[in-house]
Image (tube, grey):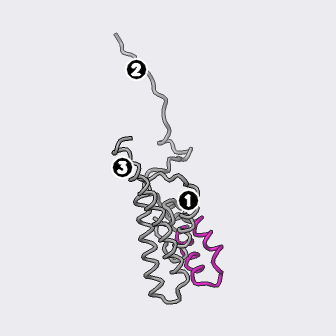
Amino acid sequence: MSQWVVALENGIQARADFIRVELEVGIAFADVALSAHDERKRNRNTKKAYAAYVAILRFMPQVVLPDASAFIHDFENFQRKLIALGEMGEDVLGRRLDDRIRRLSTMADLVPQSSPMHQRITERIKSELCEYFEREKKPQYGADRRRPKSDPKMRIEPSRKHRSSS
């Protein structure tokens, strides 16, 4: 093998190792933050865990992991911990409404109902649903292509061929 191929393979392996280590470090910071009683310690470790999460998202598209199922399981666990720590941004919860609500409801089931975190999650779910229904009332784009059947203006007339007289 040429030196370039070996260097390329080493680079790919180094990126995969970096993502795995970053995931382990992020989970460790999240665990420390979850077990912290001091608010400053919790915030500091939450920020470090979130930084690890952002780094993983940044480099993940560039790497193909051989043990992807184990990584995905750990990554989803890491996301749940970030949500439990209060990181509820779109990058953690997901862009799609159903993804966000599903993740939040899963977390709400894991957190005791009397806890303040359960209240925060419930409020977030309510706000996501309200946003959805407000968007559906007044769509910003012309996506609603349904038309009333009784509207004569919207009726499409069949085209007629024009004959030219000679």
Question: Main structural element of the magenta stretch: helix, strand or loop?
Answer: helix
Q: Nearer the viewer, mark 3 or mark 2?
A: 3
Q: Nearer the viewer, mark 1 or mark 3?
A: 3
Q: Secondary structure at mark 2?
A: loop
Instruction: Please tell me whether residue 119 belongs to the stretch shown in magenta.
Output: yes
Q: Which mark is residue 72?
A: 1
Where is residue 23? Give x, y as percent: 49, 66
Residue 99, image x, y percentages = 55, 61
**Callout 2 environment at 10 Å: few (<14), some (14 to 19), or many (20+)?**
few
Label 3 close to label 2 by CB (< 8 Å)? no
Q: Are marks 1 and 3 in contact (CB under 8 Å)?
A: no
- Marks 2 and 1 sit apart, C-alpha to C-alpha, by 63 Å
Q: In the image, residue 74 lies at what x, y percent?
A: 56, 64
Q: Which image quarter: residue 106?
A: bottom right
Distance, label 1 to label 3, CA atoms, is 27 Å
Q: Which residues are magenta?
A: 102-128
> Relative to 145, does residue 164 appear above or below in the rendering?
above
Quadrant where the image shows the N terminus: top left
Can you say which quadrant of the picture contains the C terminus?
Answer: top left
Q: Earlier in the sequence, mark 1 or mark 3?
A: 3
Instruction: Residue at 54% x, 59% y: name it.
Output: 71
Q: Amino acid at mark 2?
A: His
Task: Tell which of 6 and 96 is nearer to you.
Answer: 6
> Which residue sits furthest top?
166
* Residue topped by disc 3: 7
Q: Is residue 156 magenta?
A: no
Could you tell me which residue is drawn at 53 percent across and 47 percent down?
146
Amino acid type at mark 1: Ile
Q: Which residue is mark 2?
A: 162
